[in-house]
Amino acid sequence: MNIEAFSRCKYRKVDRQGDDVPFILPGIAIGLFDGATDVKGTLINSTPAGRMAALNAAECVAQLLAPPENRKLPARELVNKLSTLYAKSFEKHSVSPLPATTLALTIDCGDNWRFFCLGDSGIRINGSEILRHTKLIDDVSTFARVALFHDLSERLPDLDSAEMAARRAIFLGFDDAVEKGIMGRELADNIITKTIVGLSLQNEGAIIRDFLTAGICMQYRFANEVGNSLCYDVLADGTPQIGDWVDAWRPKEDVQTIEVFSDGYAKLPDNPTVAAWEAAFEETDRQDFHRISEYATVKGGTEDEFFDDRTVVIIQCPRIQPT
């Protein structure tokens, strides 16, 4: 097989580390991990918490999948074992809560490929079949941030300032933003109401309000929990409860190309090459630089940062000739 990989941190000057980690162990598994950016800038042994999450997860997956029999474990058992290894990997650091990371893996299972995703990193097979799970809590953050960005862009001197102020408010919460003078209480309440109505989440109104006032910095409360629609599965504290991972098997003879990608790519290209993925990224950056319309997301681009780290790993599979 041929393997092509590209990973670019969000910082345009490349003066800091990003949170994406590509993962390539031919004969075992190929994929990536996308650590959740710590909004307070937490460092663990001088490494950003999100990147440490991705690195530790990569080591745990390598350990777990080295024995061939583990690659065929039922999804629940696979996730449970991985979660246990992940928690142990942080014991020496005394970190609480544990930082979170997604994973998207193409696992070598002999005559078959196993595609396993936890979180919102994705896999595309043969340029057409997309395996990916998204979570509602990101839609809530995105809707609210875009609404606030539009208000701030009319009051602040430039769009970069509007983006950074909106990003701070979403990350650290509307209560903090009101206290710091970024927005008034009436505006905060109006945006929360618009978010609830716009996403048809009236039955979850109190939970949405609590989340947006506290901010993404408190989002970990919904990770690996059950009880409301904002809960989601991820590799973090505890063990995924909902079962909203992706687990798919395909015969190797049916697979010609595999593309594993993080959510730093908002548009998928036509061709399975790094050049095509980067061209697609550049197109979305031109069309929606601040990520407030067609490619709206939790963060927008600025002159100093892309909207997110981005990573893609591409596998060109040899055609298996029948014997």
Image (spheres, grey):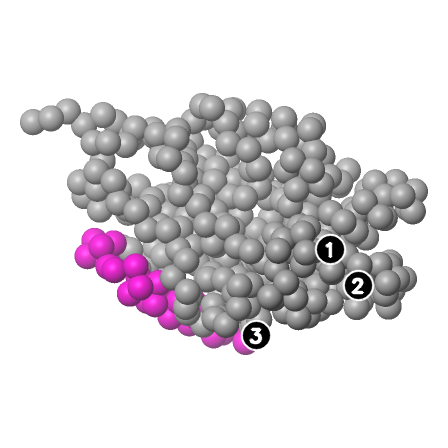
Image coordinates for residue 64, horizontal then vertical, percent: 30, 60
Residue name at image x 69 percent, y 28 percent? 286
Q: Nearer the viewer, residue 184 or 181?
A: 184
Q: Residues within 10 Å of mark 2 (few under 14, many from 20)?
A: some
Amino acid under disc 1: Lys
Asked if the residue under mark 3 is in contact with the one under mark 2, i.e. CB atoms within 8 Å, the reply is no
The N terminus - image quarter: top left
Image coordinates for residue 162, horizontal then vertical, percent: 83, 46
Identify whether 315 is placed above or below 113.
Answer: above
Amino acid under disc 2: Asp
Q: Residues within 10 Å of mark 3 (few under 14, many from 20)?
A: few
Q: Nearer the viewer, residue 13 or 120?
A: 120
Span of residues in magenta: 68-94
Kindly identify which residue carries mark 3: 96
Q: Tell me if 74 is positioned left or right of 51 in this view.
A: left
Q: Main secondary structure of the magenta part?
A: helix
Kindly identify which residue carries mark 2: 189
Kindly identify which residue carries mark 1: 194
Which residue extends farthest left?
323
Tag 3's secondary structure? loop
Identify whether 39 is placed above or below 113.
Answer: below
Tag 2's secondary structure? helix
Q: Does residue 258 appear in the picture of this structure?
A: no
Q: Earlier along the polypeptide chain: callout 3 or callout 1? A: 3
